[in-house]
Image (cartoon, grey):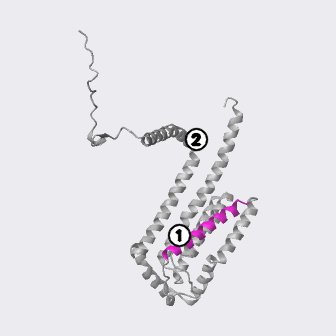
Amino acid sequence: MTLVPDPTARRATPVVPAREAIGDRDLGHWRSRLGQALARIVIALVLAVVRFLPRAVQWSLGHIALVATLVVGGTVALLLEHAAGEVYESVVGSTGIARLDRPVLDLMVQVRSPAAAEVVTDFTNIGGKVGMPILAAVASLTLAWWWRRWTPVVLMIAAAAGSLLLTVGAKEVTARARPPMALAVPPLETSTSFPSGHTLNATVIVGVVGYLLLFRLASTRARVAVVAVTALFVVLMGLSRVYLGHHWLSDVVAAWLFGLGWLAVVVTAHRLMITLGRVEPVRSNSGRSDPAE
């Protein structure tokens, strides 16, 4: 006996889990044209990503120096800028390192002498609006003549422009008052206090000069000397601002961190340019040497 299906009988409706439905509406079924179109777009994007990932991994392995430079440089820059942000938070909340501002300033006033203040003032003027641009111009042009190319000038312009924007932007945002004028050594500063512009600009500009010098020095002792002199100059520039009563200690610490962060960005960008310049010739040479490719 053959059973004939009853055409009037209803087909069994699949049971939809409660978490995949709203009432009797199956959320896995797109009824409207707009919903169906969105679903197709999402599926296409997911498939594109799945297909792209193996190529991206293969490219990364083939350009490991480029990827490593970007990851390391980017991580260092982000960590330094994050640390600078933490200093700012301590200033806003009068916590952490900001608690040392007044005690350190009082100590500087106690140990200050007229003769030392005059010497420190002459030194700190190097990092001012006149001294630092002259230093940057002379150093970058000298290095450009030494290198026989304009790379040092371009790098210095980019570094100085970013440093200036960081200084001006941060001062506008924070609008922090400087230490009391009665405790400062003339000539007095009129701009806001956070961060120290002298320190930030010195960190970036002198840091770039030191970085460029390392390219032309073969001796390990000479390289160590350049790093030591660069670090000493930057540290003394920051301390001079506190000694003269022109900045709080937290202003200087934040400037060091901001400056080192931007310096890391500039150095990373330069190293990426060098790495990319080496990748392209290798690719073109390999293409000519192997006719099968």
Sequence-wise, the earlier of marks 1 and 2 is 2
Give, as a single range, the part of the protein colored magenta: 150-174
The residue sitting at the front extreme is 8
Kindly identify which residue carries mark 1: 256
Residue 147 drawn above or below residue 113: above
Is residue 138 rendered to the left or right of residue 101? right
How many numbered discs sit on the rendered protein?
A: 2
In percent of the image, x 68 and y 37: which residue is there? 286
Quadrant location of the C terminus in the rendered image: top right
Please say whether residue 141 is one of the residues in the magenta stretch. Answer: no
Residue 227, can we see it?
yes
Is residue 118 rendered to the left or right of residue 216? left
Kindly identify which residue carries mark 2: 62
Q: What residue type is labelled 2?
A: Gly
Please say whether residue 156 is one of the residues in the magenta stretch. Answer: yes
- Marks 1 and 2, how far apart in space? 36 Å
Q: What residue type is labelled 1?
A: Trp
In percent of the image, x 50 and y 60: which residue is there? 78
Residue 17 drawn above or below residue 138: above
Could you tell me what secondary structure mostly forms the magenta stretch? helix
Q: Which of 7 and 222 is in front in this view?
A: 7
Quadrant location of the N terminus in the rendered image: top left
Residue 236, can we see it?
no
Q: Which of 234 and 278 is in front in this view?
A: 278
